[in-house]
Amino acid sequence: MTDLTAFRSFSTRLTTRMSAAHLPLLIGGVIFGLIVLAAALGPFLTPYGPEDTSLMERFKGPSLAHPFGTDSFGRDILSRVLHGGHVSLGIGLAVITISAGLGIAIGATAGYFPRLDNPIMRVMDAGEAFPTLLMAIALAAVLGPGITNVILALGVAYAPRTARIVRASILVLSQQQFVEAARASGAGPLRIIGLHLLPNAMAPVVVQMTFIFADAVLAEAALSFIGVGPPPPAPTWGNIIADGRTYLYSASWITLFPGLAIFLTVLSLNLMGDGLRDLLDPRLKKVT
Amino acid sequence: MSRYILKRLLSAIPVLLLVSIAAFVLIQLVPGDAAAIIAGPDASNDEVEFVRRQLGLDRPWPLRLQDWIFGLAQGDLGYSYILNRPVTEAILERLPVTLSLAGLSIIFATVLGVALGVLAAVFHRSWIDALAMTVALFGVSVPNFWFGLIAILIFAVGLGWFPPGGYVSPTESFTGWLSAMALPALTLGTASMGQISRFSRSVMLEQLGQDYVRTARAKGLGQGNVIGRHALKNAMIPILTVIGISFSLTMAGAIIVESVFSLNGLGRLMLHGIQRRDYPVLQGGMLVIAFSFVIINLLVDILYSWLDPRVRYD
């Protein structure tokens, strides 16, 4: 009986701890999953195309026919928000792929080769002296508006952040015995980095990728809003808000719904990042 | 102390130099003929050639880089053909608006952020903790330009508490300035508030678990003294770093928030620079923001060594 009580109390404690760590991950994952699903199924969820105009339907408030209302061209805001999700999430995914690729290559080189560490990290310092958003705005402004340029600008702007984290992990891991053993068995630097160091350094990188995804969605929307993102009429969330700004007082729904979509996406990614961090690498808790 | 400050000042020089080179390289990335773009689509061949010569684009890049660095050392950020005036002059005219916006938003973010972080840590795993962290999560997740528009809709148009935009100089009317800057500062500071409170919570939690806190409590010190005079004082050192980083983020965020609230600051100047392809203005603005980041970090480091003398001997 006593054993059973002790087991029950142990299992309750374990469940509480597990759910405390997993709750943000679960909530974030469910919201993000729903957003991805809605963006993917967008064309099947509404009868209107994102760029279908109807002069008879201009500035209609939210109704059953148009749950998010319509804009100055009579375009259905729900269709545009769903299609915008497609674009924004695609950009976010491409940005984390580029920043992870660049950041891992730069960080691993700096962390593994002590002679290259100082020059590489000083360049990263200079890169980080430009706030990411500013760097992205400047790059996008110089390269010209367009989805590819936004992806490139954000991917490059977020690379130093990943590089720093990879470098820190590689520096610590390089001192471990298993690396010493690999070196003694004749493994070259590429093999040691690729097969031994990077797989062990990935946990903080995965956590960081989630936060960069969230930041990239915010930054892309901001770039679109100020006119250096993908050019209109591409229905990105930032573009729809910029369109709606002119009619903020008379048709606030044009601005409201795409903003809510950005907010929910970023919120879900931040929750997932928090949960993943607690699960994979609690030491990072302080850094983010 | 002075030796430490000197060491930190010297270490900032290579970063400032690299930042200057980065700003120079950025403009070299402009695809196509930069002189033709800057001169505008209606410019004649002679005008394009004139701009090319004036900007030194007909000279090899090492010489241009040298001119740029020497110019910078004398406070010369180049010349804007669109504004028809020196870039330094245009930036200096707009800088007070941006600095006052960034300053106010950082004050808001720091006061509210640290307070929420401390409350969350002290009442760890209670509803206060959950509420404080929900506010913080909202701060880091909400797009600031959208939040600004919604704030205008509610507080300026709906309730009429604040003006929807525009700038009033504090020398003209202090209350007018405060009222004009309230919504922009709130909008710009929300993300930093979220970051500062999330970070403050974890640092405070770490400090509250330390032995010296237990000793202070065992001596019979009250909760206020233990938190305010012991734990928070030690926690403030790492929190300062985040505040320093937040300052530069707000300077960059100003580009967007100034546009939402029609404030004629550095951000709006840069935005117009982007729209009109006025690259010297964009380059100068970027450099000023990056320099301010380096200088703020330097000040934070110096403040560190004052708060915790051990840093000086590291």
Image (cartoon, coloured by chain):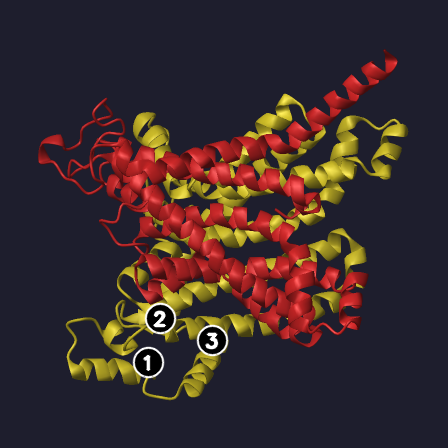
Chain colours: A red, B yellow
Q: Earlier in the sequence, mark 1 or mark 3?
A: 1
Say which residue appears at 30% left-offset and 42% top-offset. Answer: A83
Q: Position of residue A200 (x, y in %)?
A: 68, 55
Q: CA distance from mark 2 to mark 3?
A: 13 Å
Report which quarter residue B46 is drawn in.
bottom left
Disc 2 is placed on an element classified as helix
* Contact flag, marks 2 and 3 (Cβ < 8 Å): no
Say which residue appears at 80% left-offset and 20% top-offset. Answer: A7
Identify which residue, B120 or A232, lies in the foreground.
Answer: A232
Answer with left or right where residue A193 lies relative to residue B269: right
Q: Residue furthest left?
A: A56
Chain at numbered mark 2: B
Report which residue position mark 2 lands on.
B280
Q: Position of residue A204 (x, y in %)?
A: 63, 51
Report which residue position mark 1 lands on.
B55
Q: CA distance from mark 2 to mark 1?
A: 9 Å
Q: Name the disc covering residue B174, or none.
A: none
User: Where is B157 relative to B287, above or below?
Assistant: above
Q: Is residue A199 visible?
A: yes
Q: Is residue A81 visible?
A: no
Disc 3 is placed on an element classified as helix
